[in-house]
Amino acid sequence: MATQIQAGRPAATAGAGAVHKYYQRFDRIDRVMHAFLMTTFIGCAITGLPLVFSDHEWAASLARALGGFQTAALIHRICAGTMITVWLLHVIRIFYDAATRTGFLAVFWGPNSMVPQPQDIFDMWNHFKWFVGKGPRPQFDRWTYWEKFDYWAVFWGMAIIGGSGLILWFPAQFAAFLPGWIFNVATVVHGEEALLAVGFIFTIHFFNGHIRPEKFPMDLVIFTGRIPEHELKDERPQEFRRLVAEGRLAAAEAAPPTPWTKVFGWVVGGAAVIVGTATVVVIVYSVLN
């Protein structure tokens, strides 16, 4: 989740006398929320696909492995309820931080805002030029244009999938004030948007976060919360220069991630990538057949 860089502990010494500086990029709340979001999203994907592709043999086998369609539906609702709760807590946190710490202007404008801005358009264009060797690599700040795209795809996807899912979850309550045709629309929207979300997260988001060359095979920052100094300088030079100019770089220093945190990131992140890739393969296979 998007927050400003938080102050951490002084950087520690690692290796044979070499000092490797790290800076805090995500705080503990960010990482916990992402962990819940990641886990519940995968849970919803695994338990929802057997219903979408119920006419395929693999779907029936997966449902049986989960304890049957009823058990899969129960797991799906538990994961969905948790995911909606995390989304609501994230929205509440944004407004709370704006009211108590950052100010509401920072939510909509500036380097720490996730709202797309004119600079993102220039960054995108310059990035495409760099791809084809027609210009230098753009100088990114705290959030790149593709990170904002990822964020808003998930944000609005949660609202659409969650809203339609709640209608299908509590039909009697919603039928008291909604017309009957809404439930048909909700059924279509929930299934199609969910497939779109699964396809996007398990391809575009995984590529941006882990598979692109400079991050392959795994970017551990969302698990450790810390980014090494050389990555901050190389990948987000505008942010590095801004922190130096504002005199906030030293306050953002953090201790290097512990070995167990790295192992946790490799195991959990690797498992998520494997499950996500397998899910995409199954979806493509089912659609083509």
Image: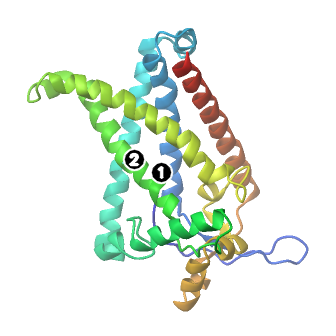
Q: Is residue 3 above or below residue 168?
A: below
Q: Badge 1 is on which residue?
A: 33
Q: How many marks?
A: 2
Q: Quadrant of residue 239?
A: bottom right
Give SS at disc 1: helix
Image location (x, y in percent) of residue 283:
54, 25
| x 39%, y 47%: residue | 86
Q: Quadrant of residue 132?
A: bottom right
| x 48%, y 11%: residue | 68
Image location (x, y in percent) of residue 220:
67, 55
| x 21%, y 24%: residue | 183
Image location (x, y in percent) of residue 26:
54, 63
Residue 183 left/right relative to 203: left
Which numbered disc covers residue 86? Answer: 2
| Residue contact at pointers 2 and 1, CB within 8 angstroms | yes
Q: Is residue 143 visible?
A: no
